[in-house]
Image: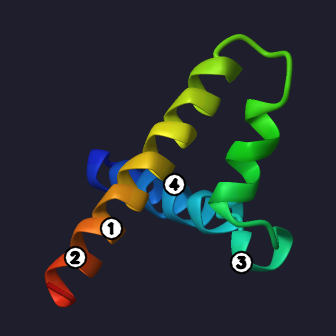
């Protein structure tokens, strides 16, 4: 077998396996990223407190940005 045939065969095999291994997450999961993070934040795994803290901080930043936006629209 030539080296070129081997490379082409390997590439085709890799593409085929990659296509078969691709998971369609749109049908298997109906939870949002926020819901998944919330579940992780409530768990006992290491780093769960950091996830909860990050979510709290993100909520605070979003609320502050909303207040600033509403203040600029209604002076």
Query: Measured from the top left, where is residue 10 in percent x and y?
Result: 46, 51
Depth order, front residue of 19/42: 42
Element type where label 4 sits in the image: helix
Q: Could you classify mark 4 by the number of other residues whose Cα lies within 10 Å: few (under 14), some (14-19), or many (20 or more)?
A: few
From the viewer's side, name the closer residue of 35 and 1: 35
**Residue 1 seen in this snapshot:** no
Above or below, 30 against 8 in this view is below
Q: Which residue is mark 1?
A: 67
Which disc is residue 14 wearing?
A: 4
Q: Is residue 17 left or right of residue 27?
A: left
- Mark 4 and mark 1 in contact? Answer it, CB < 8 Å: no
- Between the residue at mark 4 and the residue at mark 2, the CA separation in whole angstroms equals 56 Å
- Count residues near mark 2 (Cα–Cα under 10 Å), then give few for <14, some for 14-19, many for 20+: few
Contact, mark 2 vs mark 1 (Cβ under 8 Å)? yes
Q: Quadrant of residue 43?
A: top right
Query: Label 3, label 4: how many angstroms apart (C-alpha)?
Result: 24 Å
- Of callouts 3 and 2, which one flags the residue occurring earlier in the amino acid sequence? 3
Mark 3 and mark 4 residues within 8 Å of each other at the beta carbon: no
Quadrant of the image occupied by residue 23: bottom right
Q: Earlier in the sequence, mark 3 or mark 4?
A: 4
SS label for mark 1: helix
At a point 60% along the width and 68% down the height, the residue shown is 19
Question: For residue 26, which numbered disc appears in the image?
Answer: 3
Dot 3 falls on a residue whose secondary structure is helix
Q: Nearer the viewer, residue 23 or 62?
A: 62
Q: Are marks 4 and 2 in contact (CB under 8 Å)?
A: no
């Amino acid at each position: 077998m030539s080296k070129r045939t081997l490379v082409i065969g390997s590439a085709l095999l890799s593409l085929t396996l990659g296509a078969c291994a691709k998971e369609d997450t749109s049908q298997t999961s109906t939870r949002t990223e926020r819901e998944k993070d919330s579940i992780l934040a409530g768990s006992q795994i290491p780093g769960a407190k950091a996830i909860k803290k990050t979510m709290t901080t993100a909520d605070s930043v979003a609320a502050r940005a909303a207040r600033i936006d509403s203040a600029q629209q209604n002076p």
